[in-house]
Amino acid sequence: MKELNHEQEKASQVDQEGSLKHYYVWDRGVRWFHWINVIAVLGLIAVGTVILNATSLGVSSEGKVDLKILHAWIGYVFALNLLWRIIWGFIGSPYARWSAILPGGSGYGGRLKEWLLGVKAGKVPSYRGHNPAARLMLALLFFVLATQMVTGLVLAGTDLYFPPFGHEFAEWATAAGEDHSKLEGLVPGAKEMLDPEGYAAMRRFRAPFIEIHEIGFWVMLLAIFGHIAAVVISEVKERDGLISAMFSGYKVFRDKPKD
Ligand code: HEM
């Protein structure tokens, strides 16, 4: 009974204000991608941090291989989810599309300027989808996610001989050529089956990928921090239900959104 009264009270507040409107923004596809991505990225950061500090943590070589395998398995979930989101950006609902996410397009510069002036004047223009500044942040986030995916898949091949490139790297490292029987029993860290020259060349090829993967990790930490800060500030200032919208799909506005 008490709860009903509270609900009624809330409803009448909305009625009195007369202008709170709910808009469906984030479809199921976007919401599922978002939360799977959050969980996978947190897992990858946690295991990646241990790999990065394996020596000082006293992790054995076998332990490090196990950590890499765990990291790669989480990485596959992350990569499939991201690949699926890239496709959804072409076929999903209007606010899920790349045209509504990435910066650019006709009049983008003007809208960004208007948004920045709005922030300065304390009256931020409302957007149903992403505002023009958020689009810049999202471009950075998706770029780093894609970079981690590509470099991670190469490393899974060079370090673990895992798909999609593992077979090619195994051939290179063992100089097996077409003789695939030579690859039988090849496991990460098993040096005796390796062809020294081929293996050294494969490791030289790998070097920039591990470097970029590590830089990507640090950029990602910064980008995640920036993303969370921007979402919390926007929720507090604009009170548009931005955070709950990632669960329910709905945002709430007083004024008519620009888009
Ligand atoms: C958000 C995404 C990701 C983050 C933040 C991340 C982070 C990291 C970090 C910090 C390391 C340790 C780097 C080092 O030892 O110098 C690492 C290594 C590694 N990552 Fe990722 N990673 C991500 C995605 C992926 C994906 C998608 C895969 C592949 C499926 C992958 C495969 C690997 C492998 C095989 C290593 C071991 C390389 C090595 O240290 O020798 N990663 N990752």
Image (cartoon, grey):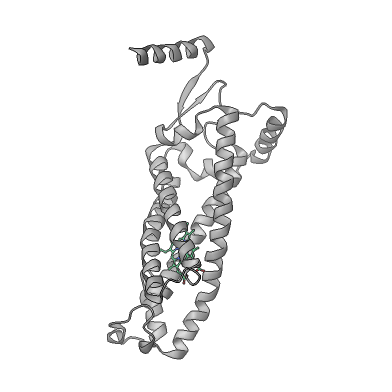
> Which residue is painted at 52% across and 65% down in the image?
213
Q: Nearer the viewer, residue 72 or 252?
A: 72
In-image side of 124 versus 228 (left or right): right
Q: Position of residue 20 (x, y in %)?
A: 51, 18
Report the quarter where the N terminus lies: top left
Q: Is residue 46 above or below residue 91?
A: below
> Which residue is painted at 30% across and 84% down in the image?
180
> Which residue is painted at 28% across and 82% down in the image?
185
> Which residue is painted at 50% across and 33% down in the image?
242
Report the quarter where the C terminus lies: top right
The answer to whether residue 53 is seen in the rendering is yes
Q: Position of residue 65 (x, y in %)?
A: 38, 72
Q: Position of residue 45 (x, y in %)?
A: 47, 57
The answer to whether residue 258 is seen in the rendering is no
Q: Is residue 49 above or below residue 4?
A: below
Q: Is residue 45 above or below residue 189?
A: above
